[in-house]
Amino acid sequence: MSYCQKALRVNLTTGIIEIEHLSEEFLSEYIGGRGLNMKRLYEEVPPEVDALSPQNKLFLGVGPLTGTSFPGSGRINISAKSPQTGILGDSNAGGFFGAELKFAGFDQVIIEGRAEELSYLFIHDGKAEIRKAEYLRGLDVPETQEKILKELKDSRVQVACIGPAAENGVMYSGIFCNLVRAAARTGMGTVMASKNLKAIAVKGTGSLAPKDVVRFREIIEEIDQQIRSHVEYKPRVMLGTTKLVHALNEAGCLATRHFQTGRFESAEEVSGEYLAERYKKKGKACFACTIPCSRFFELTEGKYKGLKSEGPEFEGLAGFSSRVGVGDIGSALKGVDLCNRYGLDVISTSECISFAMELYQRGIITEKEADGLDLSWGNSEAVLELIEKIAYRQGFGDLLADGVVRAAEKIGRGSSEYAMHVKGLEIFQADPRGLKGYALGVAVATRGGDHLRSEPSFEFTENPEEGIKRFGVPESAFRLEYKGKGKVVKFYEERCVLSDCLNVCKNTVVNMEILSFEQAAELLAADTGLAFSAENLQKSSERIINLERAYIVRAGIRRRDDTLPKRFLTEPLPKECGPSAGSIVELEPMLDEYYENHQWDKETGIPTREKLIDLGLENVVEDLLERGIL
Amino acid sequence: MEKIKVHIQYLGVIRLLINKKKEIFFFQEKPNLKILLETIASQYGKEVDDECKKQMFILYQPGDRAGKVMETQDLVEDGALVKIVSLVTGG
């Protein structure tokens, strides 16, 4: 598929649409997708910009493998300054939208300014137009897509849109592709809404064949073979990420009742196995993917009989079950469905609700303050009602709609202690005390409390010889050990960057470790005709990580912010958590090792001048010097 | 002769492959992990055996409510529960 070497710049204020050429140098240094976006973000959105002002910019980036036959190559990165955290905003979605953008002739889209009236952007085969969207105001995600496809009279158009949550300014609103494929984290939907932009529709009929079609095809066949023979293939096909409910529960680190324990007594009733046996209709894959890890389901019984959708992923399933103490899968699936319709991030939403439930449990807030809702654990109706209140900023929902940090600030009474976030971004559905490499990764992730910036799944292998071979210490292969995790996290950060720059799925490239840097270089060379090497790709990955670190350092982030909520650092997991019982996170030694491996200052967490220069980031050095940071 | 009764609970891929959630096996002596695997393989064949070798076995000895990841040398007591579950991986 190669590169289109084109970026579309759309100024919604002036209505001017321009096409920019992307140089080979830019593409070689930043690869694609996330890399392209981060470079632009650093240069075009300084820390002084208000995230909800017209000066913020929304970047959509795809990679050189997007739209090819590489498995899962339909992903897209969407980035901006985050209104939720005030630092780096970046989100990634699967499905088919990314591929369509490539077919339409663009590697990147830059959206700036603010439209005078509600609009949507239609991109088609090298062109773009801003269209009126007032008739879409207030519509949920499926309704929006349906109406746009009807207007354009083309069911093959791909749509990325926001729902009512973003229009109402909920800080953790996402941008949804293919209805349920969410670029959910860090409030990218909120940014889009602030620009008066309801949707982006894309149709492309272009084709960019790989430069060396034969070699490209050969490598893809090797990749497919590696995937099919991988130990993770069957679990992914049969259960996808929903397998993690039982797996984490047995390991004793499933987020339960807001991390008060790691074992959920009703895990069976909300498990991926339970869902597969009763309600799965068929498997579903993303664009070109060998692994149909998603599914269509339909509830055939219970209160939500008739509910049907694609999904869920583990984060949504656990977020509206174990995290809130609800042991009914129908209700959990309904919760995910509401978030998809309203356009909400399931992780942030489930954290805000479970936070409120813990405050209620502890008597810090009353039923009256919660609009008369009984926020006892397991009250699924209260959970679902709160999702709607958040989406429409009604009553108590309005307080939660700004995220858990701001909610805690407003409530006061010591509630901040119970806000499970890092740098303002709410954390996932696994207990960090049971996954220490993940704990470190979440603490240092450049977009805030996020597990997808590193995904150090090596710590599950429990193979001490491999630990020594790959990271120099046997403990690195054990999730309950902290030694070696600084190195492990750095390694996986680079794998995640590679995945996000190629815009292919992390399940394959990171979790299954398919596609080494060497293989990636060969594949890209065959695809683009450009000279890629494993060393350059790895260096580019490191460059992007350091650029992101510099971006958040520029916004004031230091070592003190690379932390975790107090519970994970000081309260051992309780006895019922089996293999993980008694565990806490030893963060400081892991941080020391992490900074050392990155060659960042250990006291501050700021990348050193030498490191930045080595990575060709002289302009960043200059910028940080001017700001008195270096 | 005294028999060792072991409760097996299938989770993850194994459960979906054999379409079964639980089973009871009887052994003459306390089994270890190797014997459990051989027993399941003889019952369900190679495909299941291959998948079982990639799973996590959580052992709940009688009276133990917490459980532990079963290791090669562990012997399963009479009345114990063993859960066979997918490895934790990224997601």
Image (cartoon, coloured by chain):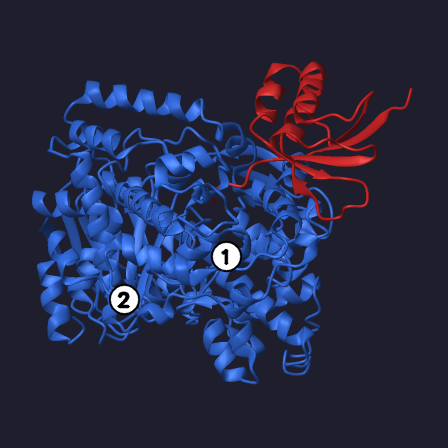
Chain colours: A blue, B red
**Where residue A280 sits in the image (x, y, percent)?**
61, 36
Residue appearing at x 46%, y 44% in the figure: A475
What's the distance in space between the residues labelled 1 and 2, CA to CA? 21 Å
**Where residue A378 sits in the image (x, y, percent)?**
71, 62
Report the front residue among A616 and A16: A616
Report the front residue among A18 and A471: A471
Residue that mark 1 sits on: A428
Mark 2 secondary-structure assignment: helix
Left/right placement of residue A230 relative to residue A204 reads right
- Which residue ends up furthest to the right in the rendered image? B1
Q: Image height check: is A9 above or below A103?
A: below
Query: In the rendered image, which quarter is residue A130 located in?
Result: bottom left
Kind of residue indicated by mark 2: Ile
Residue that mark 2 sits on: A552
Answer whether residue B71 is visible to the viewer in this image: yes
Chain letter of the residue carrying label 1: A
Left/right placement of residue A261 relative to residue A70 reads right
